[in-house]
Amino acid sequence: MWLLPGNGGGDGGNGGEGGDKPDGPPGYIQDIGTSRHAWNGLRESCNLPGEEQPPLQFQYAVTTGENDPSGEIPLGKAEIGYRLKYEEPNLPPYYVSVEVKPPHLLDTDEFGYVSKAADLYEGDETQWKNLVYPDDFSDRAGGKVRPAPPLADDPGEWTVVYHHATSDKNHRSVVCHGFMADTVSE
């Protein structure tokens, strides 16, 4: 009886919590056979919803050099960002990793190129956390690291999937989006 919660004795048991807690911050998420998302440019939507709901007030954006009104993003690159609209103080870490799938991978279950996971709540969570494709993305299969290919190498519909990562091999999609890439000269 002293193991029951609220009696002040013992640790109350783990109640199964141990499997949900990460061993440490995730690095680069790995393919776990769940990469079936595909963005359709005509519909401006993805074929599948996220596997879990994103945090309240989660915002995301994808801007390519071709459609950047400020002209700050170079042609042939894409800026992929996320943030919270309003501050959410005192929350446990929530690691986000972004997967980018070129058009030639959309008809397969093959995993795309991924960014390093970052804590959404670290620092000022209302400030945009921006990644640049292809610079901040790579393929890390079979113990090898391969840089992401330029957008010009694969024109068409690109898919961007935001993942909630609790470890490198434990992650779930929260948002799917995408963009069009054309053949460009850099």
Image: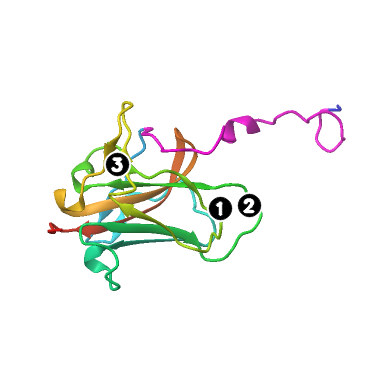
Marks 3 and 2 sit apart, C-alpha to C-alpha, by: 29 Å
Residue 53 place in picture, x, y as percent: 49, 52
Give the residue at x 53% y 39%: 25
Residue 27 place in picture, x, y as percent: 45, 38
Label of residue 48 in the image: none
Mark positioned earlier in the residue sequence (3 or 1): 3
Q: How is the image coloured?
A: rainbow
Q: Which residue is mark 3?
A: 112
Mark positioned earlier in the residue sequence (3 or 2): 2
Residue 1 place in picture, x, y as percent: 86, 27
Give the residue at x 52% y 66%: 85
Q: Does the magenta segment cover residue 15?
A: yes
Assess disc 3: are there few (<14), some (14-19) or many (≥20) residues with their C-alpha within 10 Å of its C-alpha.
Answer: many
For the C terminus, the quadrant is bottom left
Left or right: 173 in relation to 6? left
Q: Which residue is mark 1?
A: 122
Q: Amino acid at mark 2?
A: Leu
Up/down of 72 relative to 186, above or below: below
Q: Look at the image and tell me whether residue 171 can be seen.
A: yes
Q: Amino acid at mark 3?
A: Gly
Q: Which residue is mark 2?
A: 91
Query: Dot 2: what SS?
Result: loop
Query: Given contact means CB atoms under 8 Å apart, are the residues at marks 3 and 2 in contact?
Result: no
Marks 2 and 1 sit apart, C-alpha to C-alpha, by: 10 Å
Q: Nearer the viewer, mark 2 or mark 1?
A: 1
Pick the residue in front: 27 or 173. 27
Marks 3 and 1 sit apart, C-alpha to C-alpha, by: 25 Å
Give the residue at x 36% y 37%: 34
